[in-house]
Image: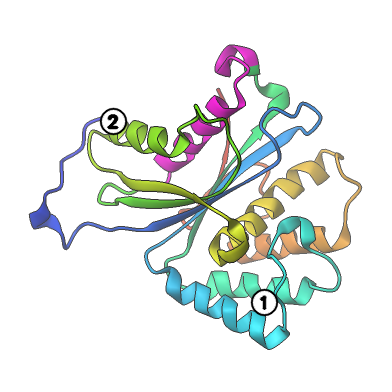
Amino acid sequence: MSEKLLTIKDFKKIRTPFVFFDETGSVNDRNNRYFGLGMIKCMQPYFLDTKIRKIREKNNFYDEIKSNKVGKKNFRVMKEIIDAIFTTPGIKFGCIVINKDHLDFKAEFKNDPYLAYQNFTEELLKKNIGKTELLIVLADYISTPDNIKFEVDVKHNMNKHFERLAVCGVHRVDSIGINLIQITDLLLGAVVYEFKYRNKLVSGDRSKIGLYKYILRKVGIKTFVNGNKKKRFNVMIYQK
């Protein structure tokens, strides 16, 4: 895939967004039908991060902002955080949802969960990068065998695919101290929860249902399960 190469002289055109990456579910757990990867992309994380820190201080809320922790006690705070996301300019969310019932894990990925995870990561990044963007990727840390070089391979494969410097670097960090990875989890978890709820895989937690419906209203659509191609909130459904 060939694009016009940028040079140092094009520095005013070059954009260097941060990407905050997280996942929900396990890629090789056959008992959990849906697996998802999500990302938030923004040029200046400072603005949203500052808003979230102020929300935390005002509400004395210092727990992780995670979709599986959404409940009656913190629902109002979670909504306030969602409001902050959608009122901050330049915040873009993208995710890919995989129905593992439609996935031939052996044929496509040789029963290798790390290969599958990397493939889905690259697929999501490819669909959410602009022609003049150089991405800086911070992903939630997961433990892997010593022979897995996820960070190195994703950067190499993305740059090779686009035949340019598309990804400056990839680094895995502990999400406990990173608000923007946590809110990636919050948005992604809400999207995937609707898939589970509509397919009757969960009985339906009132707070979790309320949160995904609240996000739907913010996005301006009726459901996530058909995917969504809006630039600011992109939901991809994996199809081989």
Going by the image, does 57 lie left or right of 153?
right
* Residue at 91%, 47% in the rendered image: 203
Kindly identify which residue carries mark 2: 160
Q: Is residue 137 on the magenta stretch?
A: no
Mark 2 falls on what kind of element? helix
Q: Residue 54 versus residue 15: which sits nearer the camera?
A: 54
Q: Position of residue 212 (x, y in %)?
A: 72, 58
* Residue at 61%, 74% in the rendered image: 83
* Residue most extreme to the top: 107
Identify the image quadrant of residue 187: bottom right
* Residue at 11%, 54% in the rendered image: 8
Residue 52 versus residue 174 in the image, above or below: below
Mark 1 falls on what kind of element? helix
Residue 183 versus residue 197 in the image, above or below: below
Residue 24 versus residue 183 in the image, above or below: above
The circle on residue 186 is none
Q: Which residues are magenta?
A: 106-128
* Residue most extreme to the right: 203
Going by the image, does 85 lie left or right of 136?
right
Q: Where's the C terminus, which quadrant?
A: top right
First in sequence: mark 1 vs mark 2: 1
The answer to whether residue 234 is seen in the rendering is: no
| Circle nearer the viewer, 1 or 2 | 2
Residue 130 versus residue 183 in the image, above or below: above
Amino acid type at circle 2 is: Lys
Mark 2, other Cα within 10 Å: few <14 / some 14–19 / many ≥20: some
Kindly identify which residue carries mark 1: 80
Q: Position of residue 46 (x, y in %)?
A: 44, 74
